[in-house]
Image (tube, rainbow, N blue to C red):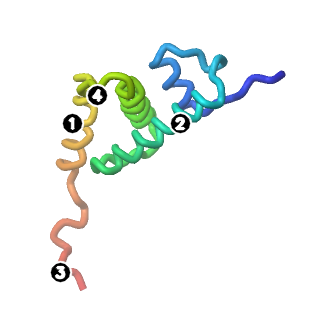
Amino acid sequence: MSATTYEPEIVMLCTDLGLLPENLDDRLAALLQAKLDTAQQQLHDAGIVLKGGLDDLDLLVSYAAWLYRGRVKQQDKPLMLQRMLHNRQVSKATKPNPFAGMEDWP
């Protein structure tokens, strides 16, 4: 019997949650994937674009882990996650727009 290979996001989420990827069954793997999908959608809804870098992966997994833990007991976002989100939003808001002032361009 061969071991199932999971995407890096699932493996990182398992690590964050203290789970061993090799012990996942199909139901738990599907639940974790659903949390990752929900996290990605909620980040997108908040105006945060994930481009696939390590920082993006870390943010996605941290957010999904918070969602997973919150299914049992509603908790505020951890301070670290709040800061990660805030830094992303501030960075996006302060990034110069190269097309600024070209609204009247023919």
In the image, is 88 to the left or to the right of 27?
left
Nearer to the camera, 38 or 49: 38
Q: Residue 10: percent from the left, percent from the top?
A: 55, 29
> Which sits earlier in the primary sequence, circle 2 or circle 1?
2
Discs 1/3, front: 1
- Which amino acid, mark 4? Leu
Q: Residue 39: percent from the left, percent from the top?
A: 40, 39
- Which amino acid, mark 1? His
In the image, is 69 to the left or to the right of 47?
right
Residue 91 vertical position relative to residue 97 in the rendered view, above or below: above
Question: Which quadrant: the C terminus?
Answer: bottom left
Using a 10 Å C-alpha cutoff, classify the residue at mark 1 as few (fewer than 14 neighbours), some (14 to 19) or many (20 or more). Answer: few
Q: CA distance from mark 2 to mark 3?
A: 45 Å
Q: Residue 19: percent from the left, percent from the top?
A: 54, 16
Image point 63% across, 22% down: which residue? Answer: 24
Q: Which residue is mark 1?
A: 86
Q: Which residue is mark 2?
A: 33
Discs 2/1, front: 2
Q: Which residue is mark 4?
A: 81
Nearer to the camera, 5 or 105: 5
Residue 10 vertical position relative to residue 23 in the rendered view, above or below: below
Q: Secondary structure at mark 2?
A: helix
Label annotation for residue 104: 3
